Amino acid sequence: LYDMSGNVWEWVEDWYAADAYSLHSQDNPRYSRGGSTRVRRGGSWANDASLASCVLRSRYAPGERNAYLGLRLIRAE
């Protein structure tokens, strides 16, 4: 895996909950109960370098669109 942060905030499937990690196991926790905001990770070119971290999570409205929010394509084999 290469270049995980710093280009655009990465949209992930999880719904945002401040206490999501305390509600689930630490082995690939996933929060799917729904809500009003989704999780984004990683920081972007528009942020300070201290925000360029894949462990950083933030929230945003599902309909939000901007130049510093994107997704990571994967290839399954």
Image (cartoon, rainbow, N blue to C red):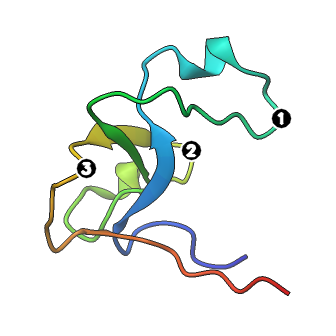
In x, y percent, where is residue 31? Answer: 57, 31
Q: CA distance from mark 1 to mark 3?
A: 25 Å
Nearer the observer: mark 3 or 2; the answer is 3
Closer to us: 32 or 64: 32
**Dot 2 amino acid type:** Val
Q: Residue at x 83, y 35 (%)?
A: 27
Report which residue position mark 1 lands on: 27
Q: CA distance from mark 1 to mark 2?
A: 14 Å
Closer to us: 5 or 16: 16
Closer to us: 42 or 48: 42
Compared across the picture, whether 43 is left or right of 29 comes to left
Quadrant (top left/top right/bottom left/bottom right) for the N terminus: bottom right
For marks 1 and 2 on the same chain, the one whose residue lies earlier in the sequence: 1
Extreme residue toward the front, this view: 33
**Dot 3 amino acid type:** Pro
Q: Secondary structure at mark 1?
A: loop
For marks 1 and 3 on the same chain, the one whose residue lies earlier in the sequence: 1
Report which residue position mark 3 lands on: 62
**Dot 1 amino acid type:** Asp
Q: CA distance from mark 3 to mark 2?
A: 20 Å
Q: Residue at x 62, y 21 (%)?
A: 21
Quadrant (top left/top right/bottom left/bottom right) for the C terminus: bottom right
Q: Are marks 1 and 3 in contact (CB under 8 Å)?
A: no
Q: Please tell me the numbered disc located at residue 55.
A: 2
Compared across the picture, whether 21 is left or right of 61 comes to right
